[in-house]
Structure formats: structure tokens, C-alpha cells
Image (cartoon, rainbow, N blue to C red):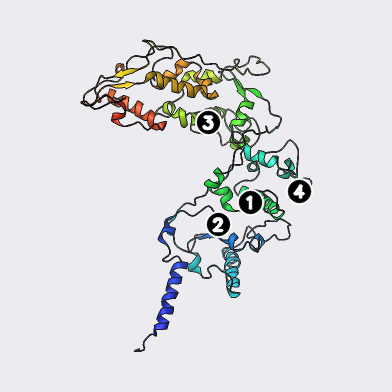
Amino acid sequence: MGSRISPMLMVAFSSLLMVLATTTGCGGDPDKQTQPPGASTLELRLPDSAGPLQRPATRFDHALHTDALESEGCAVCHDKGGTGAILGPFLTLPKNASRDELMDSYHHKCTGCHQERARRRAKAGPQTCGDCHVARQSLPVARTSVSFDASLHQRHASTPGFDCNTCHHVFDEGQQKLVYRKGEESACAYCHGGADDGKKLSLRHAVHTTCVGCHLERLQKRLSRGPVQCVGCHEPSSISGIAKLKSVQRMERGQKDSAWIKALDAEFPAVGFDHAAHEPLAASCSSCHHHKLAACETCHPPTGKPEGGYVGLERAYHQGDSERTCVGCHLAKTRTGDCAGCHARPGAQPSQSSCSVCHNGPASGVQEPDRPPTQEVVLQPLASFSEAFPENVTIGLMSHDYKPAVVQHGRIVARLDGIARRSKLAMRFHRTTESLCAGCHHHTPPGMRPPPCSSCHALDEKTGDKPGLRSAYHQQCMGCHERMGIAKVGCTDCHARVGTEEKR
């Protein structure tokens, strides 16, 4: 009871506490506890079918392990299992494996490896429960996924020794094996879903086994190849470093250059759709054909059906809050960049006159031409400055603390006109230079001289159904500047204070 602890034992005990604090996560670096895990971090947990977790899920740093085991290769963890594949699965278990079998498999493979390495005095990871199962703040992994777009597809297709059957295949029921069928090439996600289904791998497993496996094989042969580490495909900075090809070869699948889009017994005229013009603007075919390469009405008939999530044809074309529809995709384009000033303001919606821009074909039941017309829209030049189209407009109705604001009307219109002429989408829907006026004069028919803003917006701010004049000016002007990234949004950027010199 009265014995003393020796100084050497105290030093040893203190050192042990420091090691435990830095390895178990009980008192680790607080910054690391609150930072989102990197792209190479995986969360290892049992499936939901195994019941609730008894300990926190384990964070597994894949990059840390690949660096440590580089000389030993992937097969240390990914057993090929006699398949001949260069990259096998981490665990191979029956679908009906019990909770204990699942836990024992992870512990045997992970902890067993750590213990074996520790016995031969090699660099090893944690070997006790608390070192891996650490309670942490729940933070999303900072990971995204590379888009296998047309540019990346072209990079693969043009690789020496590659052709379509290098990647594309279908399952032949008669031969009970994967075969290549020319003309049936499609996106991987059309067959590979969110979970393994028998021998059919999930999209995630198929991509990692096939794509990363190919990259590893080419690495062994010292050939040019794609990423073999997680960050190469899942870290935004790495993905942004993949240069986009300026010219991409068209992926031929027997598609027409253009076609008439129509529904049976539709009241509106048919839509002339330029398929060839849309192809280079989409990331890939699955941007529009998101489940199979087929006409929209195959999955989305007018009344909907289960295969299309009961989304009818009208919604499939016109739903504005989905970027997979025609209207939704167009709206998404208008709400970013240079178009946002006019189109991203609150309450902005396509006008009813927009319908005729697309529905420009023959009426239902009328025999349409073989090929839809691809009409080029040519905008007329801007009019010369005049009383009806002034170069500058002075707004001084409410001048009090600030002097009148001089709006560079001509300069603003010229900027918007230049933006519209650089976009085929904008030219198609604007059609006339007068349509630019609607960005500010939002209730005036195109071609008519707009009335003063005070005609609709009263000086009294308590008008209820619409902004007062002061609010209308500031929402319209400052809102446009903010949406387009124009720095001048301060009071004196537009009008000088009373008692000061006019700003130039």
C-alpha cells in the first residue's frame, strides 16, 4: 500500500498514454475529428440487414494502405480467387451470411493482417477494437465521382488497341457468358444498378473491378493509363485536371440527325428536334436517355408506366425542376452565368409565347416533311439611339439623400445583346432584339415602348401585391448585378450622396 512507483515506470506509463491518445481516437487531433474525410476514406459497416451497429463504423483510409503495401500489390487485400482478374473483391461472402460471419470476416482480414505484420515488426495498423471503432462527428466524405462523359469516352476509344468490345458487353443467355454485340453498346448504368444481383455486379463494383483493373494492368505493362488511386476519380481537384477534348467523334448508334417529336392526338404542333446539334452539348447519351437508348415515350407514355416512374410524356418533356427534361435543361442553362441576370430573378418563368419556339411543326394528323427544318435564327442589329431607345436614362424621382442615378442604358443593352448572339439557345428563344427589353421591362410586350416603372410601382412601399418603386429599382438592378457577379452593388456605385461631386 505504501510502495512508490519508480520514475522509470512513470515515464513508461506516461508514454503509453500518449501513444494510446494518438492512436485510439479518444484524444486525437481535434482538427482531424471535425474535418470531412478525404476522397480515399471509406466507411466500413455491416449491411442494414445485420441489425444496428454495436460500435461506431470504421473509417478506412484506402490511400494510406495502398502506399504502405505498394511493394506487395493489391492482391494482399483483394483476393483474385482463381478468377484471373487483376483486381478481386475485398470480401467474398454468401448473401445469407450471418452477422457473426460478416464481423469475423472483417476482423480476420483487417485485424489479422495488422497482427501478422506486428509480429514480424513491420509497419502495422490498429489491433484492438477501440482503435478502429472510434466515435467521431458525423461528417460527409469529401468525395465526388468522375463523369464518364463524351470527352473521356473519346480518350478511351482512341487508345491504341482499344475498340468497342474492350468495355461494352451484354450477357448471352444461351451461352451463359458476356459477349460483344455491335450496335448494342450502351452506358454501364443501364445494366449495372445500385447493388450486386447474383453474378451481375453493381455499378460501383463493376467500375472498380473493370476500370481500375484495366488501369492496373496497363500500369504493370508500363503503358499510359488512368488513375489507380481513389483521388484520381473522386477528388474534385484531380477531376478538374482532366483536360476536355475540343473535338469529340460522334457516337453512332443509328440515330437520326433530326426528328419530329409528337404525341398521338396531341393538340399542339409537332416539335422539330435537332438531335445532332444537342449531342455535343450533353455530357453523354445517358444525360437524356437515362435508363436505356430508346425514344422517350418508350418509358414515358402519355399516362406513364412503372418503368418510367409513372412520369407521363408531358412531364418528361416539360417539368421545369428536372434537368433531365427539355424545359428543365433549358431553364438550368439560363440560370447560370451571363443569363442569370434576367432569368434567375425570383418568379421568372418561361412565357406562353415560348411554346411556339419548339412546337413549330405541322399539326397533329398532318403528314410532316421527312426532315424537320433547321431554321437558323438571325438577330437584327440593335437600333440607333433615339428618344424611344435612349443611350442613358436618369432616375431621379426619389432623389433625397442621394443624387439621381444615371443608367447607362445603351451599354447594358449592348452587353445583353452580345451574350445572346454567342448562344444558339438564346438566339432561338429570343428571336428578336426587342426580347432583351423584357429582362428589365418585364410586363411590356416586345416591340412596344415601355412605360415608366412608376406606372406600376408606386412610391408608397406598402402596396401589398408588388414592390414599391424604391424596392423595385433595387431588387431589379442590384439583383441582376449580384447574379451576374458585377461588383458594383453599393449605394454610391450608382448615385452620389447629396453634397458630393458626381461620380464618373
Taking the image as drawn, is residue 335 in sight? no
Q: Residue at x 67, y 56 (%)?
A: 87
Dot in front, 3 or 4: 3
Which amino acid type is shown beneath numbered disc 2? Pro
Residue ranking furthest to the top: 387
Q: Secondary structure at mark 2?
A: loop
Q: Secondary structure at mark 3?
A: helix
Label drawn at residue 208: 1
Q: Secondary structure at mark 4?
A: strand
Q: Please identify the quadrant where the C terminus is shown.
A: top left
Q: Are marks 3 and 2 in contact (CB under 8 Å)?
A: no
Q: How far is mark 4 from mark 1, CA to CA? A: 20 Å
Q: Earlier in the sequence, mark 3 or mark 4?
A: 4
Which amino acid type is shown beneath numbered disc 1? His
Q: How far is mark 2 from mark 4, CA to CA? A: 29 Å
User: Circle 4 sits on which residue?
Assistant: 177
User: Circle 2 sits on which residue?
Assistant: 47
Instruction: Find residue 146 and report its horizontal and vertical position in percent.
Output: 58, 44
